[in-house]
Image (spheres, helix red, strand yellow):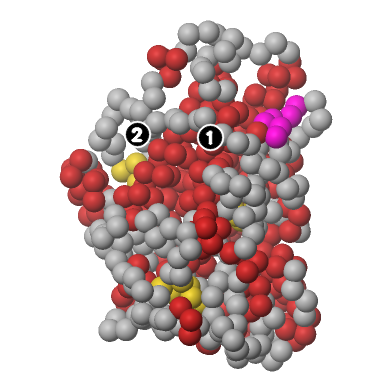
Amino acid sequence: MKKILIILMAFLVIASCTKLEDLNKDTKNPTAVPGVTLFSNAQKNLADQIASTNVNMNVFKLFAQYWTETTYTDEANYDIINRTIADNAWREWYRDVLMDLKDARLVIGATKYATAEEEAAAANQLVIADILECFVYERMVTLWGDVPYTQALDINNINPAYDDAKTIYKDLLTRLDTDIANLTPNVAAGSYGTADVIYGGDVASWIMFAQSLKLKMGVILIKSDLALATSTINSALPGVFTSNADNAEVHYLTSPPNTNPLYVDLTLSGRQDFVGTNTIIDDNMNPLEDPRRAAYFTTVPDTTIYLGGIYGASNPYGDYSHVGDMITQDPTFPCIVLSYVEVEFYRAEAAARGITNEDAAEHYAHGIEASFDWWGVDGAADYIAKPEVAYDATKWEELIGTQAWLAYYNNGYTGWTSWRRLQVPTFNPPPGMVMSDIPLRFTYPVFEQTLNGANYDAAAAAIGGDLMSTRLFFLK
């Protein structure tokens, strides 16, 4: 993928309650903020929320048991109430990503264009914004379950009803099919150009993104709706990512506020909050002498040893492996939104389950190879040849689940979701807890209980209780 630099947008402050009708004065220039800039801002906010490890916003590298905490261990012990983490994440997704996408579409749709080429580009812009909106709702539905959807983002309705999560999921698939059919990948019809900080406005890449998202959603639906999962997976396969060059990534700049949030959280802050876990280092990477250890982590200070802290315990920073320099020392370190690595492991799983006629072992190996390649690590062939790693159809779930989880290290939410679905590898409950205490979802925001109480109560009842242990539709 082309390395697209993020447009500086420090001037942009868009509140979720902005009334477009107050700004829509000139039919040729409907608002003071161009629609393409709103789209850029939505992408930047989305990437920041995925990449960040600020425990007020994002705890998924902890939930995936890639990292654990040193001094303040509440989040590694699954306390998301103290810092109102669910409330913050909910606001971020609805206000700072979805609302910007909605406003972008309103502005783009209301603008008058001088040429047929500009009109065609605007049409593609609207479709791409919808594709990204589908990605966001997919994330929210698999995080919370039922969420406001059909009544969401309406400033005149401050108490939106929650929609059924599986119904939303099906609708998102319908939207993606429509979007794929409506995109025009030719030279004359562009889209966002450099305002698109993921693909630089390349329409063909967005079609591949939509197909790869469909594949992901099909795999996630397997336990819930095998027939729909099967048709979704097989219809998506011809158009999915084929190499790391197709990845949906955001590449950051060298200076704040446009560096990767990890650089801010782990380096500029001067804090020493995280170490690698015993789960990933001691239980999974060390036994395999995984060459990616040097990219993922440092050795213990003044040693050549990789050692993980006890998950959920208080771990002295100097006694364990730290987050790798490739992540902490590079302000431009990319955020992965959707990757070829994911695609290959989804293809391997679908083949292993007999949903496709593809070769599970081939795609399993491609997933591992793509992970090594992305991190710039040699030795994939020898690693795959290890008896503990070599593909074996009789234990496909353990192998694919473990290797996918290891490869998803740079995307905590994806790693946690893989574990939620397959329960592989074996996680370590925090001290004093048991396996059933490991979360399967976020609870709803506290402010929803107080400000949207009736709809909150209905949603909580519909999913089986607003608990972190509640099994969402795709886990049943």
Q: In the rendered image, which quarter contains the C terminus?
A: bottom left
Q: Measured from the top left, where is residue 355 in percent x and y? A: 62, 66
Q: Measured from the top left, where is residue 222 in percent x and y? A: 51, 63
Label 2 residue SS: loop
Q: Measured from the top left, where is residue 415 in percent x and y? A: 52, 67
Name the kind of residue labelled 2 in the image.
Gln
- Magenta stretch: give its range: 189-194
What residue would you read off at disc 1? 10
- For discs 2 and 1, the disc positioned in front in the rendered view: 1
Residue at point 42%, 62% (across, down): 59
Q: Is residue 191 magenta?
A: yes
Say which mark, if any, is on residue 73.
none
Name the kind of residue labelled 1 in the image.
Ala
Magenta: main secondary structure equals loop
* Residue 94 appears in the rendering: yes
Q: Residues within 10 Å of mark 1 (few under 14, many from 20)?
A: few
Q: Residues within 10 Å of mark 2 (few under 14, many from 20)?
A: some
Residue placed furthest toward the right: 187
Quarter of the image for residue 343 reads bottom right
Camera-side residue: 18 or 367? 18
Quarter of the image for residue 356 reads bottom right
What residue would you read off at disc 2? 151
Residue at point 32%, 77% (across, down): 436
